[in-house]
Amino acid sequence: MPDQTDQALLDILRRNARTPTAVLARRLGVSRTTLQGRIERLERQGHIRGYTLVESSDDDLVRAHVSIVLTPRHRQKVERDLKTLPELRELHAVSGASDLIALLGASTTESINRAIDDIGQLEGVERTVSAIILSTRFRRSH
């Protein structure tokens, strides 16, 4: 299981998998040699495959669906702000009582809780309704 530094590394790569090694090392406060060793270990463990981040399994994550109701004329700003959240896995425009549904994933419930709070604080978000996924009863592969 990745440690806290590994999780921070994966979060950065999730946002931009092409971040240069020197920048990654500086942001994480480690040497380039140490960083390279971490990347190689994460590759061996299957967390990183090639140059694209592929997480080993969503089953390892705490997940939540967050229904988001927007104030008028804020969709683009809210979508842009949501994309900066490392916990955001998917974002869907939907019909019905909500405008968007966000699928979040993180290693801890605390991270999910912070992300849900962050979403609720975004300018243009009128309200949210969240549901933590307790278990997956069925999943169809593509």
Image: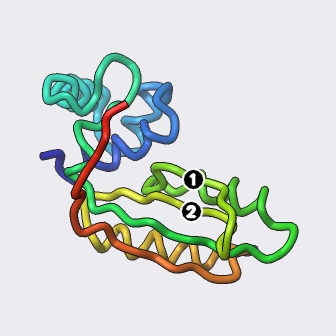
Residue 101 is marked as 2
The residue tagged 1 is 91
**Looking at this view, is 75 or 11 the one in front?**
75
Quadrant hosting residue 25: top left
Residue type highlighted by circle 1:
Leu
| Residue 107: image location, x then y, percent | 26, 58
67 to 63, vertically: above or below: below
- Badge 1 element: strand
Q: Residue at x 66, y 76 (%)?
A: 97
Residue at left offset 25%, top offset 65%: 108
Q: Residue at x 61, y 72 (%)?
A: 68
**Observer-nearest residue: 57 or 141?**
141
Q: In this rendering, would 58 be left or right of 80?
A: left
Query: Which sits in the foreground, 106 or 7?
Result: 106
Residue displayed at 45% across by 49% down: 89
In this view, 76 is above or below 114: above
Residue type for callout 2: Ile
Mark identifier at residue 102: none
Asked whether, in this view, residue 128 is left or right of residue 111, the answer is right
Going by the picture, which residue comes out furthest to the right? 73
